[in-house]
Image: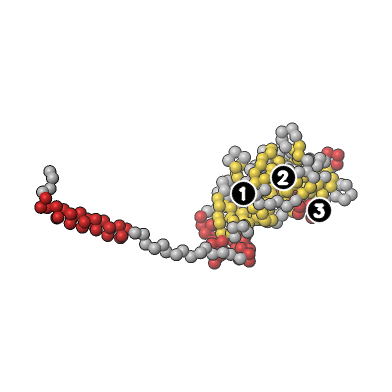
Amino acid sequence: MRLSRPHSLTRRARLIAGATGLAAAAALALPAAATAQPAPKTFSATELNQTAASVRTADVGGTAWYVDTASGKVVVTADSTVSKAEIAKLRSEAGVNADALVVKRTPGKFSKLIAGGEAITTGGARCSLGFNVQDSAGTKFALTAGHCTNIGSSWSIGTTAGSSFPGDDYGIIRHSDPGAADGRVYLYNGSYQEIDGAADATVGQSVQRSGSTTGLHGGTVTGLNATVNYGADGIVSGLIQTNVCAEPGDSGGALFSGSTALGLTSGGSGNCSSGGTTFYQPVTEALSVYGVSII
């Protein structure tokens, strides 16, 4: 039913009043001025190194860490055994630098990668050969992980001539049959990769790992100068961190990029079904300590 004309002014007034009310409501609904947020704190190189040292002091098994200069943070990787309370302990130990910590989770448990089986063996334990090398006299040796050479002096390929673990993770075995020392890396597909030298790894570098348990797998370098706490087995520093998978028995195996030797498999977490995080002893350090070169 239409409104009668005498009420038109009243209706108009109501409409105007309603519109005014909406405008007032709209004005009230305007967002408040954004509150200024403090800029995130930046940390000096000294503070980052102090933070990394605090993680070591906290001594939480199942953690690994490195200083990421690109982000200005200390990246901590915690395996599945690390509790929330232990992560809180890391932050507490870091004190005023707690915000410099970035904690990431990885599945499984950090451990040395060693198992019973074949490949290079000693006393029923199995590891993987890293790179064949020689000294200035032409004597042939094999480089592998130190936690491998620590457990036996007599190997299927020769005799332990040196070992360093924990702290570092490299060892050297003198070949009993020098003629068997091949300078290449086996790719587990019937072919080999020639290795013509060694270098330090770089973050973001594409790499491959060869090991006697899982064969050949690839991935990327995610961190350098990493430290990993293997719990009762000790702490190892100066490692290459990657997202390449590995499993027990792959220890000591070769990490390389093209024809360049980079590292020796130390340990990690996860497996080659679900993936994981792995750590490698830089091969350049072992070459320098033992005075040898890639064959």
- Categorize mark 1 by other alpha carbons within 10 Å: few (<14), some (14-19), many (20+): many
How many numbered dots are placed on residues in this image?
3
Query: Residue drawn 46% across and 63% down?
Result: 37
Mark 3: which amino acid?
Tyr
Query: Residue drawn 56% across and 59% down?
Result: 101
Query: Residue drawn 30% across and 60% down?
Result: 28
First in residue order: circle 2 vs circle 1:
1
First in residue order: circle 3 vs circle 1:
1
2 vs 1, front mark: 2
* Residue lying at the far top of the rendered structure: 190
**Which of the two residues, 29 or 47, is positioned nearer the viewer here?**
29
Residue 16 figure quarter:
bottom left
**Which of the two residues, 197 or 152, is positioned nearer the viewer here?**
197
> Label 2's element?
strand
- Categorize mark 2 by other alpha carbons within 10 Å: few (<14), some (14-19), many (20+): many
**Which numbered dot is residue 257?**
2
Q: Report which residue position mark 3 lands on.
A: 290
